[in-house]
Image (cartoon, rainbow, N blue to C red):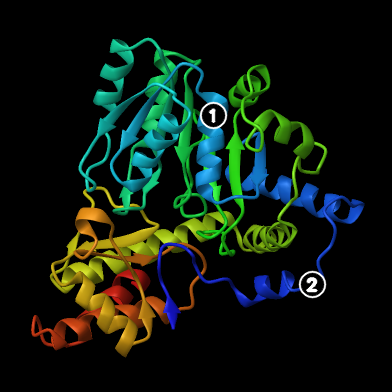
Amino acid sequence: MLLLTPGPTPVPEAIRVAMSEPTIHHRTPEFEEIFAKTRELLKKFFDMPEVLMLASSGTGAMEASVLNLCQKKALVINAGKFGERFGKICDAYQIPYQELKYDWDTPSSVDDVEKALKNDSDIDTICVQVCESAGGLRHPVEAIAKLAKAHNPEISIIADGITAVGVEKIDTTNIDALVSGSQKAFMLPPGLAMIGLSAHAMTKIQAASRGFYFNLATELKNQQKNTTAWTAPTTLVIGLKAILESIDEDGIKQLYADTAARAKATREALKTLGLKIYPKVPANSMSAVLDDDAATIRKILKQKYHVNIAGGQEHIKTTLFRINHMGIFEGYEIPWTLNAIELALDELGRRPYDGSANRVFCETLYK
């Protein structure tokens, strides 16, 4: 079965082998050495001065970032389930927030953010997705962050990069907390979250930290000594070190270029089949298609062609399908999937199969 959901992504065999070694204790010099190397590779990967690793899903890192950086009021950008989640985190801690809400296919407006900041001086944190994976949407995070910092350098920018880190180069110049998770472009099992931190974020965290397990000041103090405040997910850290070493050797820029090319070629092939790309500004992490037959197409793909792609959520649960582009791919995986979609459309009587999807994908990718 081809797993092409936008998380969890398949774990490469070499990484599975690296994680299959006997478990080691996390309070040992051996693990501290692994942890130190992983931290240095991760800082390079995030292009940020500091990183933290947490034994949690990406949502835990989102919660930790909000809890430790928002002191007065948050501005939450909501164009899907994960933007909505930032608001729910604020509610859980009784943190005041203002929400800018958009259709799930529509990126946030920089002008809307500017108006919100001018009208409310209490806003000290902006929470936004780089990629809102509910619909495969790319927000203009860098432009929002630049505007906010020009308005007030003390505003903290929390960017959920769970389905963006490792997919494309993110300009972190004005980002204070960049969140990611192991089960996406890092090609690991779920359970490890990462946060890239700016110097501004570190100062703010150390001045007024909050929480117990998600107290980032406590984690920062420990992780700068190459250990963790609580039990470390040792196997996942070992796997992360292995994947980062592999990417570092092959080149981060090449990974970004390959992912962008694969995403573009897939979208062109899907459009050739008469399918509608859902978001107005697609992220390169996935191809999201809005179609009344989405649920049926997914069922045919899984049962007949052994391809597992993701559906949507809430109001587009049965009318959206999403094809993952995060991570490292075998050459046949996307062409196989596109052929299967074209065959499914033929089976549904929508268009005769003529191999157009595979042809357009290959022409776009290789010519």
* Placement of the C terminus among the 4 image quadrants: bottom left
270 or 348: nearer the eye? 348
Disc 2 secondary structure class: loop
Residue 341 horizontal/vertical position (percent): 24, 79
Residue 186 sits in quarter: bottom right
351 or 134: nearer the eye? 134
**In the rendered image, the vertical position of residue 280 relative to residue 270, given as above or below:** above
Q: Residue shown at 32%/53% (left/top)?
A: 134
Q: Give the residue type at disc 2.
A: Glu
93 or 104: nearer the eye? 93
Q: Is residue 231 left or right of residue 113?
A: right
Residue 113 sits in quarter: top left
Disc 1 secondary structure class: helix
The residue pinned by badge 2 equals 21
Q: Residue shown at 41%/79% (left/top)?
A: 333
Q: Give the residue type at disc 1.
A: Leu
Observer able to see residue 75 = yes
* Placement of the N terminus among the 4 image quadrants: bottom left
The residue pinned by badge 1 equals 67
Spatial CA distance of label 1 from label 2 is 36 Å
Q: Residue shown at 25%/24% (left/top)?
A: 111
Q: Residue shown at 71%/75% (left/top)?
A: 17
Residue 236 horizontal/vertical position (percent): 68, 60
